[in-house]
């Protein structure tokens, strides 16, 4: 069993999903793959399956790209423009998925901030991380992002993290999670 840590920015949006074609999706994936190779940074985050499967889900970064360059791949469809615009405004990724065989492919706003990593840890390691951060070890929970930032800058907690080789390797991801949202008032680190 694993526990996934991610950033929840607290923003709720009602932008409807946009239907896209398989050819548009292929062009989008090719563009993001090229951008990732050029910038040496991940642009695609698969959840499950591949775009060749009947059922799949992946997230993609659109914030580093010009909106016109992204929406041109989808023939500047107004529904796609709305999703990409909202993603760039909120600093989030987009999700592309097909939820069942024969269903349309959908482009929608993802919950994850654009550049925020997720940590997927085995239960035991997740509990050690929570205890090291001074947070009650539970399989589901959340703490305000401002509290995570304060804990990561606490010298006592940092010494505990640095003393554990496994947690020390996760520190850059934790720090990136702490910086992921510019306005941390409503944001939180959530896990489940």
Image: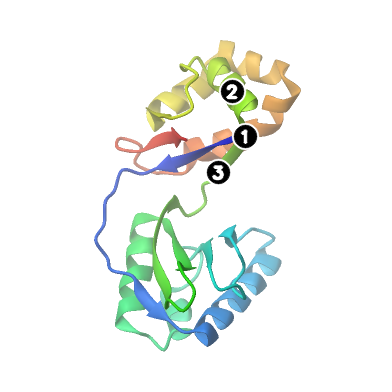
Distance from disc 2 to disc 1, alpha carbons, whole Å, reads 9 Å
Please give the label number shown on residue 5: none
Q: Residue at x 61, y 19 (%)?
A: 128
- Tell which of 21 and 41 is nearer to you: 21
Q: Nearer the viewer, mark 1 or mark 3?
A: 1
Residue lying furthest front: 101
Locate residue 31 relative to residue 79 in the image: left or right: right
> How far apart are the alpha carbons under marks 2 and 3?
14 Å
Depth order, front residue of 128/180: 128
The tag on residue 121 is 1
**How many residues crowd mark 2 within 10 Å: few (<14), some (14–19), many (20+)?**
many
Q: In this view, does 13 lie to the left or right of 59?
A: left
Q: Name the residue tied to disc 2.
A: 129
Helix, strand, or loop for circle 3? Answer: loop
Contact (CB < 8 A) between labels 2 and 3? no
Q: Earlier in the sequence, mark 2 or mark 3?
A: 3
Q: Position of residue 77 (x, y in %)?
A: 35, 84
When the figure is inspected, residue 178 is found, relative to residue 78, above or below; the finding is above
Mark 3: give few (<14), some (14-19) or many (20+) Cα within 10 Å: some
Disc 1 from disc 3: Cα separation: 10 Å
Q: Report the residue marked by disc 3.
A: 118
The residue at the far top in this view is: 156
Contact, mark 2 vs mark 1 (Cβ under 8 Å): yes
- Residue 122's x, y, as percent? 64, 32
Question: Which one is closest to the eye, mark 2 or mark 1?
Answer: 1
Q: What element carries label 2?
A: helix
């Amino acid at each position: 069993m694993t526990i996934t840590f991610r950033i929840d920015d607290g923003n709720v949006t009602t932008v409807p999903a946009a239907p896209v074609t398989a050819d548009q999706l292929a062009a989008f994936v090719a563009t993001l793959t090229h951008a990732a190779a050029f910038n040496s940074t991940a642009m695609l985050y698969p959840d499950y399956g591949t775009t060749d499967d009947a059922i799949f889900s992946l997230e993609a970064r659109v914030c580093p790209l010009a909106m016109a360059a992204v929406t041109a791949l989808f023939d500047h469809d107004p529904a796609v423009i709305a999703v990409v615009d909202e993603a760039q405004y909120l600093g989030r990724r987009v999700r592309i998925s097909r939820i069942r065989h024969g269903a349309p492919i959908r482009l929608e706003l993802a919950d994850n901030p654009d550049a925020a990593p997720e940590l997927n840890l085995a239960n035991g390691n997740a509990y050690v991380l929570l205890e090291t951060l001074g947070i009650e070890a539970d399989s589901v929970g959340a703490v305000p992002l401002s509290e995570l930032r304060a804990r990561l800058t606490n010298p006592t907690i940092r010494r505990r993290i640095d003393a554990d080789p496994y947690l020390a390797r996760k520190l850059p991801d934790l720090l990136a999670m702490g910086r992921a949202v510019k306005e941390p008032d409503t944001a939180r680190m959530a896990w489940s």
